[in-house]
Amino acid sequence: MNDFQQKLLAVAVLVFILFMNILSTKYGGVIQTLATIGKLIPIVAIIAFGLASNIAPGFSGVALSAAGSSGFGMAILGTLWAYDGWISVTNVAGELKDPVKTLPKVISFGVVFVIFVYVIFNLAIFKVLPASTIAASATPGADAAKAIFGNGGGAFLTAGIMVSVFGALNGYLMTGARVPQVMGEKRQFPFSNVLGRIHPKLQTPANALIFQSLLAVIYIFSGTFNTLTDLLIFVLWIFFTMGVFGVFILRKKSPSKKGNYRVPFYPITPVLGIVGGLYILISTVIADPVRSLVGIGITLIGLPVFLYLKKAKA
């Protein structure tokens, strides 16, 4: 498929997922579960056969000299998208049973599980491919699959990646739409009367889902996958870092009540979070200032809208 055909396919998949999530939140949950299982099948196959390989061409050639450069922080930024579901699940907290107990467990298990799979998957790739090949490849996972299973292996892993992308798109659409919907309820968004409305029969945030999908279509036709994800993660980590800093403000303004969630090992945990977040952000600005500034610029477009609505509400 050429680039334009890929974009058309992306829009078609988006419309299907939009339709299913409008019909029922449960349908979105079922899609998420099936996609998670589907994408783990090729990953588990590569891990099992890759680690069982007798040759370790990559282990001896791994260079650690770049660890202190600004590019290392930007490289970390690219991997962090794999973990981004931890924040997305909080958007549906209002639809969970006992979120005070459920959310910390779900987030902790999810992040630890992804770390475990991510690390052993990369170990399997290094067991199969030389470090130089990995560094030069845009798709090292598919290359590892070809080395293990032959030419059909690349197609096998590509199918798994497509299932993974399908699941990620569904997860982002399902959880992301809750943000403009709640902002609409609180009169914090343009066209709040429309976006804040829940469908009377289906009980889903249909208008917010459609609005988000229209924005997604614009982004699909405006840039490449890597450009969009790099911009997304950089901007998200600005807010993640500020959010972690907000823990100090909340502890001061709102003393914890019995039964509420408390950050373990306070204040060490949030301090580590802030330091790590700042390192990633500063490294990215140094390594790719243009793209970083574009991400910041797109975000700042929303500031005058926010200030206007805040003034109008007051």
Image (cartoon, rainbow, N blue to C red):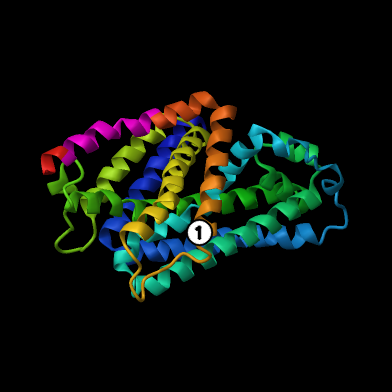
Across and down, in percent, residue 221 comes to 40, 31
Amino acid carrying label 1: it is Pro
Above or below 274: residue 132: above
- Residue at image position (16%, 64%) is 201
Residue 129 falls left or right of residue 220: right
Of residues 74 and 155, the one nearer the viewer is 74
- Residue at image position (58%, 34%) is 283
Is 307 a magenta residue? Answer: yes
Across and down, in percent, residue 101 comes to 41, 74
Residue 12 falls left or right of residue 189: right
- The C terminus - image quarter: top left
Residue 128 falls left or right of residue 107: right
Residue at which label 1 appears: 267
- Residue at image position (73%, 36%) is 66
Across and down, in percent, residue 275 comes to 55, 46
The segment highlighted magenta reads: 297-310
**Magenta span: helix, strand or loop, mainly?**
helix
Is 305 a magenta residue? Answer: yes
Of residues 185 and 222, the one nearer the viewer is 185
Of residues 239 and 88, the one nearer the viewer is 239
Q: Residue furthest front?
A: 252
Report which quarter residue 311 is drawn in.
top left
Residue 237 falls left or right of residue 131: left
- How many marks on residues? 1
